[in-house]
Each structure stands twice: as C-alpha cells, then as structure tokens.
Image (cartoon, rainbow, N blue to C red):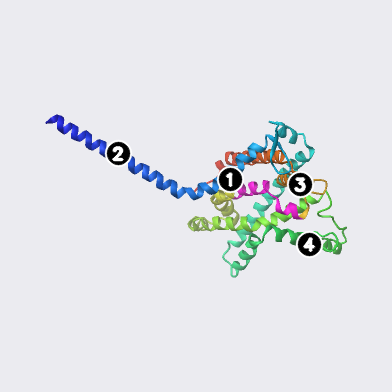
Amino acid sequence: MANSALEANETFMYQVERVKKKNRKLSFIKGMLFLLPSLILFSVFLFYPMLKTIYLSFFLTDAKGATTVFVGWDNYKEIFTDSVFLKGMKNTFLFVFYTVPLTVIISLFLTVIANEKLKGIGVFRTIFSSTMGVSVAAASVFWLYLFNPTMGLLNKFLELLGAESIGWLTDPDWALFAVSVTTIWMNIGFTFLILLGGLQSIDSSLYESADIEGSSYFYKLRRITIPMLSPTLFFVITVSIINAFQTFGQIDILTQGGPANETNLIVYSIYREAFVNYQFGSASAQAIVLFIFILLMTALQFKLGERRVHYQ
C-alpha cells in the first residue's frame, strides 16, 4: 500500500515537472517570436554589416568589393603609417574637443534661461530648440552661404568693422573652426531639449527649501541644479561625443575634407577610401579602428564621469 502511494506520488511529480518544462518551452518560444522582428532587423542592419566589415578588413578587394587577397593585419599597419589617416585622427579629436564642450555649455546656459517662469518664455524655448528640426543638408547649405568669401554675411559684417575677409572654408587655419561652429549650431537644439526636460524634472521643493534659507541664485545653481541635472548631463555628453566622432554630412557638403585635409575626419576618410578609391579593405580597417576609439571613449566616460553623477 505504501509502495503504491509512493509510486503514485512520484508519477504525479513527474507529470508536474513535465508540465513545467512544457510551459517554460512555450514561454521561450513565445518570447522568441516577440523578439524575432527585432532580431531580424539587428541581424540584417547591425550584426551582418559588422561581421562583414571585420572580414573585409583582412583582405584586399576589387572595385566591386569582392575579396581578392588575404593580407591579415597589413591593412591596419598601413593606415597607421598613412599620413592622411593620421591627420584625420588628429582632426577628429580636435573636432570633438571644439564641439562637445561648447555645445553642452551653451545649451546649459540657454536651458537655465528658458526654465525661468517668465511671460512668453515658450517662444524662446521654441527658438532655442528649433535647430533640432533642421536637416544636416539644409543647415550645411545655410552656413555655406554665411561662409561665402564674397557675398557671405559673416565677411560682410567683417568689412563693416574694417577687418579683412576670411576664407572660412578655404583657409586651412579657419576651416575646421568653421565646420565646428556649424556643428555646434546644429546640435544645440537637441541638447537644449534634453537638458530642459532634465531640469524640469528636478523636485521644486529643493528650491523652495533653499529660498527659505535665503540661498542666492548662484548657490542654488551650483548646489542644486547642476548636481541634480548630472544624470542628464552625463547622457548628453556621452551622446555628443559619439555623434562628434561620427560626423559626416556637414563635412561632405561644406569642405569635402579640404583644404589640405584640414577637415578630413575619420568617417569622411572611410567614405573616401571606400567609395572614391574603392579600397574597401582599408576602409573597413579604418571603420574598425573608429569603432574601437568610440568604445574606448565611451568606456572612459563611464569610468570617470559616472562617479560624479548624482542620482535622485
């Protein structure tokens, strides 16, 4: 009798375990079906191109992109002895140094102003964020006109002041600066909008307590606004660095990497190597190097910057 009860109990537990396994299997299949569209898109547009780029970086290719000769690490060795690529690396880091800090500082200044409770402040918020709705091509054409050496408004203004005209996009000393100014103007809208959202999410009771204690405006800015806004600032700085490393559109429209390769950033160098010189292997190696640079910069940003972030 006892043996029969034990066998029945074991049979019941076995059936329960089978049902649980079946349910887990069904749940897994359902989950994979939900993920399938994303997996397909990521595989087609991310994983396959990335693996293909790594593969091509070890080969020489013909004009159609087909591999011809396996060269191993030679493509990587060659680009680090190529003066044009090394110049592009230097220009890219200078470009990041010019654009990211100024974009964040100007956007933060505009955000603090736009957060004041003043009549008609909504108009200024719209103006400050309006550049976000302008495409790279349209913005570049607009600044191309401003930088025109003969009829551009910037040189007309310099002439009124009695100064000499500047070849903003043709002078090697000014070209990268001019492209940086264009990029800062283009990125202010997005950065401003993100910072404004972060600023408005700060608990107003913190400011009320500071007002009761008689704290000054700049004390509140330094002790409340900046610390509480640090997660948003961290996000904005990280995204801005990544975007700066990937800049292409304004370079292609304004300068095509000139004059004398002074605005030849890494992404434009990859484009020119692949679709002008048809050296897809070398271009793939450059793309991998750019990926590693962005990865290291992002990791460094998380390592050094996140410890200063104050989460609520």
Q: Which mark is residue 276?
A: 3
Please state which amino acid type lies under the numbered disc 1. Answer: Leu
Q: Residues within 10 Å of mark 2 (few under 14, many from 20)?
A: few
- Residue depth check, mark 1 versus mark 4: number of the one nearer the observer: 1
Q: Is residue 48 magenta?
A: no
Q: Give coordinates of residue 268: x percent, y percent.
A: 73, 47
Q: Which residue is mark 2?
A: 18
- Residue depth check, mark 2 versus mark 4: number of the one nearer the observer: 2
Horizontally, is 170 left or right of 93 in the view?
A: right
- Residue depth check, mark 2 versus mark 1: number of the one nearer the observer: 2
Mark 2 or mark 3: name the one nearer the start of the chain.
2
The alpha-carbon separation of the residues under discs 2 and 1 comes to 38 Å
Q: Which residue is mark 4?
A: 145
Mark 2 or mark 4: name the one nearer the start of the chain.
2
Please state which amino acid type lies under the numbered disc 2. Answer: Arg
User: Residue placed at 35% from the left, 42% from the top?
Assistant: 24
Q: Which mark is residue 311?
A: none
- CB under 8 Å between callouts 2 and 1? no
Please state which amino acid type lies under the numbered disc 3. Answer: Val
Q: Which residue is mark 1?
A: 46
